[in-house]
Image: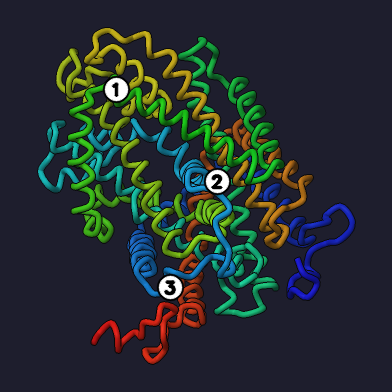
Amino acid sequence: MSANHPNAHLVATSGYLTGLHPGMGIAAKGMVVAFVLFTVLNVEFAGGLYSTIRSWIETSLSWYYISALVVLFVLCVFLMCSKWGSIRLGDDDSRPEFSNFSWFSMLFSAGVGIGILFFGVAEPIFYFDNSGAFGYPNNPHADIQGHTDMAMLRAVDAMRVTYFHWGFHAWSVYVIVGLCLAYFGFRKKLPLTLRSSLHPIIGDRIYGPIGHAVDLLAVFGTVFGVATSLGLGVSQMAAGLNVLFGISDGIVTKLMLILVISIIATISAVSGVGKGIRIISEWNIWFSIVLLAAFVAIGPFQWLMNFFVTTVGDYLWNAIPMGFWTANEASHTAWQGGWTIFYWGWWISWAPFVGMFIARISRGRTIREFMVGVMFVPTTIAFFWLCMFGGSAIWQELNAVGGPAAAGGAGIIETVRQWDLPTALYGAIANLGTMSWMGDMSWVSWPLSALATLLLASWFITSSDSGTLVITTMLSMGADNPPKVFRVIWGMGEGLVAAVLLLAGGLGALQTASIAAAFPISFILLAMAWGLVKSLSEDPSAVGMPSSETAPDGTRIQQDLHA
């Protein structure tokens, strides 16, 4: 960081906090400790408080969340097609740091990898079910159209809702945050932190209390988002180890998993983006291809391909009206709050973390290249994955020997009704071998379950190491290579937070708090979007060539092209 940079004096040059903003570093640690203590000392009270706040947001402000996501989605489409698309995220002569494969691998691993593995079977099955076992309809979008029987029409509706929660509206949040950070960080040479996106609005005040508050809120969302996901996610890994080796899926196993994952993730974060994070992300993609190929090859291939084309078309046709739908009936409101608004809050709360990481790996790409890559590539892969896993589970229920889907012959619907979501994936894998068109392929269940468990661990590692890098980048005022000692402290700290909350039973409470934190973050996101458009409109690189000037090839814009 240059000495004449307006925030250079804010980073400590000596002492324990060398390389970090002293106030931010101390405040971030204090904030994390305070929230953990508040939660674990009285889990019931804290959980009730967080739940009350979240319930109020979901029931009273669903219109706001829906409107915010629509605004961000429309802005993405506008920017993608605008004259600003050719601007590079960096100097005009800069080029991408990573190959497309490495870039897409890291995008996918950090953004959705662990989520679609965890929910890939359970979520489509939940929407396919019609029992209303949780006090509200499983899928009001299907019920409104009269598709109440567990048959093909409802299956298509189930995938449409699943795509919606993992599709373009959701990814537009990551796209806008990542674009803002990359543009202001690499092109405008401001710190690679959330505060920089507000510079067109508040100027150099981003280096004062307002900027500190913005970045601390981002640190909060990152630390507790990663920690709660890690703590809750080890339940699925523990379930996998129980299936594979008969190991107890109790607290000791979960704590050991947290320890191992935290150590590996910390080592990866210390090695940097170009080494550990990139390599593990690429491994994730190759392992994922193997697991995905198994579902495609062993399962009902032709049915799945037909189902994929049908459901993606159905989603594209209905995505816009679904994006504007707000529930009015009490039961529909409860469903929308528990699912769609929950998802929008979760995507927003993770946006500073994932957006920062996406920005960090996207230096040198054009705005259009960035937006098309981030918006369409991970989304397309996610849709195919969700259809192969969720579609396979639905097909298993439709074709189970035990009876029609309503009878739950394949056992997956019943597992989801009991809210045993971690086990749903392994149930689908077990059925894959016994219901294969190739005959009895039950022998594949063990290796595929092992691969799924390995993927759960490796995807959590990429989420954790990415989170560590993002936290230390923000606390070091946007340094490309934050101090390694603090990467170790924060990497292991995330694991410690997850372990303490797991022991105290406070993971669910703090996950609720993380979702509630999305409300103030959403205002920052909208302000960032405004600041981005304001800055782009003043960027001389985006000014079109006057009609009187001659292009490098001798073409005169109006006279020659429109003669």
Residue 473, horizontal then vertical, whole percent: 67, 55
Name the residue rendered at 53%, 49% in the picture: 513
Q: Residue furthest bottom?
A: 548
Say few, some or many: other residues with alpha carbon within 10 Å of mark 3 (under 14 / 14 to 19 / 20 or more).
many
The residue singled out by tag 1 in the image is 297
The residue singled out by tag 2 in the image is 225
The amino acid type, in three-letter code, at marker 1 is Ala
Q: Is 532 on the left or on the right of 320, as rendered? A: right
Q: Is 278 on the left or on the right of 310, as rendered? A: right
Asked if residue 381 can be seen in this view, the reply is yes
Identify the mark nearer the N-term, 1 or 2.
2
Using the numbered discs, state the Cα–Cα distance from disc 3 to disc 2 in whole angstroms. 33 Å
> Nearest the camera: 454 or 170?
454
Name the residue rendered at 36%, 41% in the picture: 382
Identify the mark nearer the N-term, 3 or 1.
3
Name the residue rendered at 30%, 49% in the picture: 164
The amino acid type, in three-letter code, at marker 2 is Gly
Residue 84 badge: 3
* Disc 2 element: helix
Residue 26, horizontal then vertical, whole percent: 77, 56
* Rendered position, 419 above or below 373: above
Q: Residue furthest right?
A: 15
* Rendered position, 242 above or below 165: above
